[in-house]
Amino acid sequence: MDNAKLLRAVSVLRDFDDEAIERLAGDSRTEDYSSGQVVLSFGRPVDAVWVVMNGRIEVDLTPINKDDENLVLGPGEVFGEISLLTGEPAVADVTAAVASRLVRVPHDSLTREMGKNPKAARPLARLLAERLVAREQAPAEQRRVEQARAGGDGELSGMMEAPILVLNCGSSSIKYALFRDRKRVLSGLVERIGGPRAGIKHDGPAGRYEAEIEGRDHEQGLAKVFELLVDPGHGALERLGDLAAVGHRTVHGGTKFTEATLIDEAVKDEMERVSILAPLHNPINLLGIRSCEKLLPEGLPQVAVFDTAFHMTMPEHAYRYALPTSFADERMLRRFGFHGTSHKYVSQAACRFLDRPIDSLKIITCHLGNGASMAAVNHGRSVDTSMGLTPLEGLVMGTRSGDVDPGLILHLLRSKMDQEELDSLLNKKSGLLGLSGISSDCREVEGAAEKGDPRALLAITVFCYRVRKYIGAYAAAMGGMDVLVFTGGIGENGDMIRSRVCNDLGFLGIEVDEAKNRGRVKGVVAKSISKEGSKVSVLVVPTDEEGMIALESSRALSRAGVSRVLEARRDMPIPVGVSAHHVHLCQEHVEALFGPGHTLTPAKALYQASEFACVEKVDLHGPGGRVERVRVLGPARPRTQVEISRTEEYKLGIDAPIRASGDLRGTPGLRLEGLVGSVDIEEGVICAQRHIHMSPEDALAFGVKDRDVVRVEIGGERSLIYGDVLVRVKPAYRLEMHLDTDEANAGEIDTGMAARIDSIQRRAG
């Protein structure tokens, strides 16, 4: 049976026309598995739907719940389809019970075809809706999904299997690495570009290769790299056209780029525009991109992975300098942060190591090396970071001063020091080098300190003090911390530095086991160095920025496919609803506020058929004031949740985070007063994240998944783009976007206006 004939027989694909089936068959591949061979392992990302052609497939559900029975799938049956909607990884081990043949249909191909003909997706949408309804009634399956999302089978497991080349172009060097089948297969360094003795060090299948090369510019250096990639002995590709993409480490993306982005002329123009903020880096990054355009096959995708992108989730109060607003905006004077690729990687790797979902943790990451920075990562989002407009702000570094009084700079300028001298002083002569007078290398400074050198001792003390101060600041900013991560050359290898930083921080819950802390950390995803019972998990996580760039490049390619679907769906408007403040109550609190045995009284139906506005109202009391007569929405929920606007947050005197509905851990509480009683909740007050409700059929038509984050355009007298809009998918949902009252008023947006999804920011999973 050929693949097209098999796919035509699959019930959920029955409404696709013959041309669509032929295209799907062309994109699919046949896979043969021997008896006992694993098809999918628990926690691995799922990027395809598999159809059983012959044999028998067993789905092992017992590891999470011993009472579950294994599922057995036979010819014509499918698996992997639920992840098309939810983005979840495999929630079970899937194994061939006997010799079996499967047809693997990529999710991206299915998304493309459903985008062309949304009506054809209805049978699949109905199946997925049934699955989701059943899951809501099955706590064991919900736990299985949570554990699969928290775990995963490897730090690069979300990467596509096709080859991805990673390039990091510096002023006189090119670092590179090739990834295939989610593994690093070769890497190397071109150095001394522009000098008389340019050279290359290449580690490939045949081992180390070193040579002097023609390297008067980056283009010549890259030409040698590409030559080695396809070399029969040293390479790993038959031809350069086998590459799926080239991912470029790019320093500055300004305010426009919040994720890795496929490079086109508009992206290059924006990189040039913001080069004023990174004059030593962005022009070189662009040079590498343009050299690749000349040397690689035409049309081969290139992706820019920005150091600044991860930190673009910082709230305005964290990224703003206290300068006149219009003056700062005109000149892009704000905090951007750097090392974002590393901070993102290690925060995610820490969660995998701890087997905890990232959206439940408050993490402080310390990237300590010759360049050093820290980040506060709250529920997976960077909410603050130590570097600012430039990499000069923040921690003490190898040669950079870190934080100094701006008045010091004015004083030096008035003392007739010119700009070049000042730049050299702060960026090249300060930090560990300036304090110690010995070296910018922390190892050499430590060695001198051990021998009693007073300046070296001071340099180490100042370095560690600055890190400790930021740990305390970020713990305060997030209202606590769960995980402290060390990474970078010093963070991974400097056990004495880690010990000095963590010493006497027990009041924050940080307790280090000195025996575990000793030595360098290599060859592991992460290592715990905290004592048993420490409230804060202290980890050392070796960073892998190149691997993360490859992963982000892979994700950018996937988003590009969805963007084409979204462009085709611009004729499908999404109604806008403006959400006023409201309260969801659990039944216990309903009775405490309105009397024993009381049930919520519907006053009117809401647009979402599963909810209704109630007759009941409550007053909210915070430390700064009160908000009266806040509507309760029904039905009762498992936990009480209060949703307020930014204006009301200020009035109540609390700092409510922007969160998705139901994400309440670590949020503030307040007092609720009803007709007969009051309730004090310890947590549960949020400012609701912008979101879109969708049914499974809507989501498949738009090519998006539950928990995707998108940008949305809302028309009116002036068209506005809203980022960080969360997609939520449930069978009972009707298509609608929700904005809170403050945002709607600021944008002059009314209920009933139309929104359209402009682009996808982040994919679920």
Image: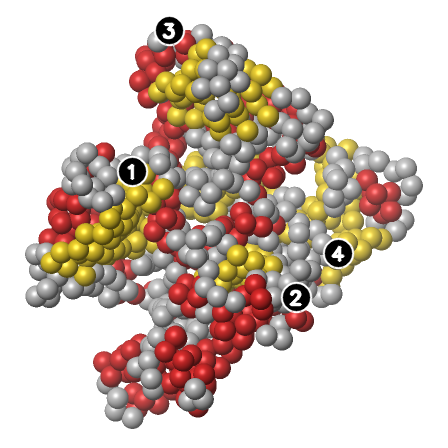
Q: Earlier in the sequence, mark 2 or mark 3?
A: 3
Residues at marks 4 and 2, CA–CA distance in whole angstroms: 20 Å
Farthest-out residue, bottom: 415
Q: Of 52 and 600, which appears nearest the observer?
A: 52
Q: Earlier in the sequence, mark 4 or mark 2?
A: 2
Q: Element at badge 1?
A: loop
Q: Earlier in the sequence, mark 3 or mark 4?
A: 3
Q: Residues within 10 Å of mark 4 (few under 14, many from 20)?
A: few
The correct choice, above or below, for 227 with respect to 327 in the image is above
Label 2 belongs to which residue? 509
Type of amino acid at the residue the image marks with label 4: Glu
Q: Residues within 10 Å of mark 1 (few under 14, many from 20)?
A: many
Type of amino acid at the residue the image marks with label 1: Pro
Residues at marks 2 and 3, CA–CA distance in whole angstroms: 62 Å
Residue 478: % across, % down: 59, 62
| Residue 126 visible from this viewpoint | no
Label 3 belongs to which residue? 1
Q: Residues within 10 Å of mark 2 (few under 14, many from 20)?
A: some
* Residue 535 relative to residue 722: left or right: right
Residues at marks 3 and 4, CA–CA distance in whole angstroms: 61 Å
Question: Which disc is residue 163 wearing?
Answer: 1
| Residue 578 visible from this viewpoint | yes
